[in-house]
Image (cartoon, rainbow, N blue to C red):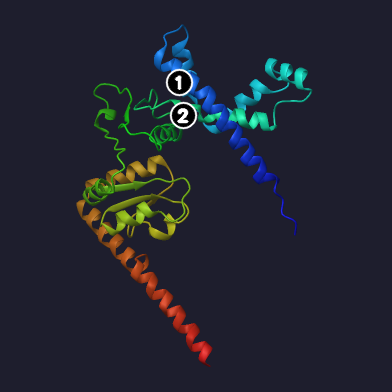
Amino acid sequence: MEFDWFPLWLSLRVAFLSTLLAAGAGIAIAYCLANREFQGKEALDAAITLPLVLPPTVLGYYLLVLLGHESALGRVYEFIFGQQLVFTVQAAVLQVDCAGSALNLQAANRIVMLEPAWSPGVNAQAVARATRIGQENPVLVSWPVIRNSIDERVVVVTADDPLLVNALQRRADVVLQKSTREGFGLTVTEAMWKGAAVIGGNVGGIRRQIRDGENGFLVSTVDQASKRIVQVLRDPALRQRLGARAKETVRENFLMSRLLEDWLDLLAVHWRQARR
C-alpha cells in the first residue's frame, strides 16, 4: 500500500510558515505593546487577548466571515492571486497565528467572570488557557457577587494541589459529581474510597459505581441534586451509612489488588486449559 505523505507535508508546511509569521509579527507587536504608547493600544491588546476566551469554533467562524470570498479582504486576495483565500495553506497559517497570538504575547494572571453562571464551560476554558505552560505567576479568578446572597458563601478552589484535593474529599460531608457525560468517574471512586457520601450524575460509568440509595445517590437534574444534598446534610446517620457502603464497594470492585486478582484468575484458567 502506497503511503500518502500529503497530510504530514501539509502539517509541517503550515507549522513552519506560521512559526515564521508569529516570530516576526509577534515580536513587533509585543515590542510595541511593551514599549510604546499610542492611540488604540488598549483595543489592540484586547483583540490579541480575545482568542484566550473565544471557543475555537467561534474564532474559526469569524475568520471564515472575515476572509471569505464575500468579504472585502477575500475579494482583494482573489483579485490579486486569482483564487479564494479560505481552505488554503495561507488561511491555515493565519488561523494558527490568530488562535495562538494571545498565548504567545500575553501572561494573564487575573480573570474576571462577569457572569459565571452563564457558561461554566467557557469559564473553565478561559482559566485553563491562562494557566498553560509558561505561566509562572499565580492566576487570580474573581467575579462580582450580590451582597448577602448565597454566592458570598461559595468558595471556589482552583489550586492544582493533590494533597488539598485529598483533604477536601476526606473532610467533605457530600461530594457531588453531576456529570452530563462520563466514562469511569475517578473522582467518584476516590471520594467513595475515602468514605464520603457521593452524589453522581445518572450517566455513563457512574451508574456502575453508585447503586442509587445504597452506597450513594444518582441524580438526573439540578433539582434532584440539590434535594439529595440537603437530605444527606440533614441526616448524619444516612451520610455515615452511605460512606461506609461506598468504601466497601470500592474495596470489592475497583482496587488494583482486586483487578490483579481477576487477571490471575483469568491466566490460571487459560493455563489449565492449555495443559489439557
Mark sitting on residue 104? 2
Q: Which corner quadrant holds the N terminus?
A: bottom right
Q: Is residue 238 left or right of residue 65?
A: left
In the image as oriented, which residue stretches furthest toward the bottom?
Answer: 276
Which residue lies at the image location 40% right of the left edge and 45% below the top edge?
A: 178
Looking at the picture, which amino acid does disc 2 mark?
Asn
How crowded pointer 2 is (Cα within 10 Å; few <14, some 14-19, many 20+) is rated as some
Which one is in front, 10 or 221? 10
Q: Is residue 195 above or below residue 134?
A: below
Which residue lies at the image location 32% right of the left edge and 55% below the top edge?
A: 190
Q: Is residue 146 above or below residue 180?
A: above
User: Would residue 96 be seen by someone viewing this image from the given angle?
Assistant: no
Mark sitting on residue 30? 1
Which residue lies at the image location 62% right of the left edge and 41% below the top edge?
A: 12
Q: Is residue 161 left or right of residue 130?
A: left
On the image, which quarter does residue 38 sit in? top left
Which one is in front, 208 or 239? 208
Element under disc 2? helix
Across and down, in percent, residue 234 comes to: 22, 46
Tell me which numbered mark, 2 or 1, is placed earlier along the sequence: 1
Across and down, in percent, residue 81 comes to: 76, 22
Looking at the picture, which amino acid does disc 1 mark?
Ala
Across and down, in percent, residue 88 comes to: 70, 32
User: Would residue 181 be seen by someone viewing this image from the given angle?
Assistant: yes
On the image, which quarter does residue 244 sit in? bottom left
Across and down, in percent, residue 48 comes to: 49, 22
Dots 2, 1 in contact, CB < 8 A? yes
In the image as oriented, which residue stretches furthest toward the top?
Answer: 39
Q: Is residue 79 left or right of residue 235?
A: right
Mark sitting on residue 44? none
Which one is in front, 56 or 239? 56
